[in-house]
Amino acid sequence: MNQIMSWFTDKLAPGMQKIFSNPWVGAVASAMQKILPFILVGSVVSIYNVFVRYIPSLPDMSFVNTFSFGMMSLIVSFMVAYFGMVELDHPKYTITAGLTSLTVFLMALCPTMATLVKNAATGKTELTITDINFLGGSGLFIAIIVALIVMVIFHFYAKLHVLENSASMPDFVCEWINNIIPMTLIYLVFGITVFTLGFDLVGFINMVFQPIVDIGQSLPGFVIICFLYVLLYSVGISAWSLNAIVKPILMAGIAANAELALAGGQPIHIVTTETIFTTALIAMGGLGGTLPLNFLMLFKCKSKKLKTMGKICLAPSVFNINEPLVYGAPIVFNPLLMIPMWMNSVVGALIIWFIMRAGFLNIPAGVNNISRIPAPICTWLTTDDYRAFFWFFILFAIYALICYPFLMKYDKQLVKEEQEKETVKKPL
């Protein structure tokens, strides 16, 4: 076990930190964090729609979701390029790169989401938007790729140091030129590709990433994603670092579910942020299903440390926040508590997959980020299914059974250590 923990400490953790500290990955990760307010706005409407189901007379508020969460890819196209310039230390190009990326993203989508229609009154041919789905979750991969290409061009141009500190012309003129040159190059590259050559950029990017989405939306992909979040967390790496890679898959899944539900169909994509986090089933009390562990610490442990931590961490755990528990118990780099946390992530993912596939629990049909509401209330609101209460308590019991033997062994170790310390303190 010591060798395994040494490998985690000396090899895995530093290696993963190096990957996620890469500026290109960091830009995507930062963008995914910054779109949270727009997701939360969409979540408010999703909660509202649960009540609309029972009170049909309530007004339709879907337009709020359409122009918040429904514009997610548009926002991400700006954010990734913006934070890319921040990460690559080109502060002069942040806004310009972001806006260029946003407008080029729209350029790339034109043949897909727009058609040319002849106006009968004027005789002129006009561009008419026929499909805005690609501005939401459906276009997320396209937005990220476009933004990364924009980042590459601005990055290499910035490294040329063209017209820097030029004494022959004013600073603002130098700044204009240094923005115009990479912008013009970017517009020409994308314009020629999309309009002159007629290359289906959207179709090509979707084709390249479809196998990744398919794997991510499969049972093995679901289990791996849930496990990786917990694995990184348990070795002291922010689990949110994984969002740069995983979030587009999760967002595309919930966006597709929302479209299916809007069309009167049934959601089919289980691998979403809502399923993993917001239902608080897999992430019950936080990543790794640690809420039962917290209760066991409070009521079953004899060591002063664990009973105290059980009291301190209970309130955050009820609201699905387990950082105090993970770092206070601690779970991080503690094999006796890391192992059940890993097991919970896998067992929980398997159970949720099969009960949702079997129709015993609704698959989330809309964007929802209300995991800070105590479960199982957030579980019910996210799935719009009263069976959520039943499955919450079933999983609570399963997680508790998994954690119990490991926690009791750790508790015995701490009790022994505390007794030894008390013995040393006693005067002879």
Image (tube, helix red, strand yellow):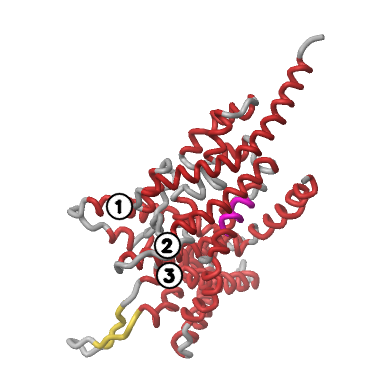
Give the residue at x 35% y 67%. 259
Question: In the rendered image of this protein, does residue 225 appear above or below residue 106?
Answer: above
Residue type highlighted by circle 3: Ser
Segment tinted magenta in the rendering: 225-232
Disc 3 element: helix
Res. 254 in view: yes
Mark closer to the chain start, 2 or 1: 1
Give the residue at x 33% y 67%. 265
Q: Which residue is mark 1?
A: 50
Residue 8 lies in the magenta stretch: no
Label ID, residue 333: none
Crowd rating for badge 1 (residues with CA inside 10 Å; few <14, some 14–19, many 20+): some
Eye-nearest disc, 3 or 1: 1
From the top left corner, tell me how far across and down residue 1 is, in percent: 77, 46
**In the drawing, does residue 270 fall left or right of residue 47?**
right
Q: Which residue is mark 2?
A: 254
Disc 2 element: helix
From the top left corner, tell me how far across and down residue 322 is, in percent: 54, 41
**Disc 2 to disc 3, how far (Cα)?**
10 Å
